[in-house]
Image (cartoon, rainbow, N blue to C red):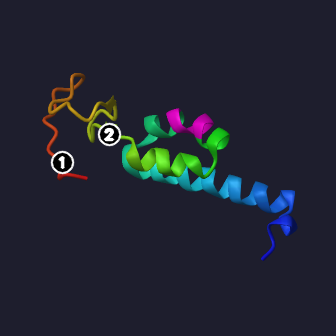
Amino acid sequence: MDIANITLLQIIVVWVAGAGIALIGAMVKGGGKLVTSYFLLSFLLGPIAIVWLIFDGRKACPFCHNILKPSLKVCPHCDHRLVYPHL
């Protein structure tokens, strides 16, 4: 395949698909609050947002769904003890 034959429509399709995959990954990883923080980022960065999501250490509390830093062991909002396997 010659790189000169790539059309603008193909680039847009790949960009939107990458953004959609990043949003689905954010939803699976951290719930609704993480999706809202990734919404604009995913459409600006497109497929690059997938890589960003993989290396982002944030997680969501399973009870109150607050976005937490990876170093926290107890949720400061609901005092739930966070026990996760190493991701």
For disc 2, the marked residue is 59
* Residue at image point 57% right, 48% down: 48
Q: Is residue 19 left or right of residue 12?
A: left
Are the residues flagged by discs 2 and 1 in contact, CB closer than 8 Å?
Answer: yes
Q: Amino acid at mark 1?
A: Tyr
Answer with the quarter of the image where residue 6 lies: bottom right
Quarter of image, res 77: top left
Q: Residue furthest top?
A: 76
Quarter of the picture containing the N terminus is bottom right
Amino acid type of the residue tagged 2 in the rendering: Lys
Q: Position of residue 23 (x, y in %)?
A: 54, 48
- What number is the disc on residue 75? none
Q: Position of residue 87 (x, y in %)?
A: 25, 53
* Residue 79 occupies quadrant: top left
Q: Assign the magenta stretch its main secondary structure.
A: helix
Q: Residue at x 86, y 65 (%)?
A: 4
Indicate the position of residue 22 as horizontal and vertical percent values.
53, 50
Which residue is pictured at 21% across the width and 22% down the height? Answer: 76
For label 1, the residue is 84
Residue 74 at x, y percent in the picture: 15, 30
Kind of element beneath mark 1: loop
Cα distance between the residues tagged 2 and 1: 10 Å
- What residue span does the magenta drawing correspond to? 37-41
Up/down of 19 relative to 1, above or below: above
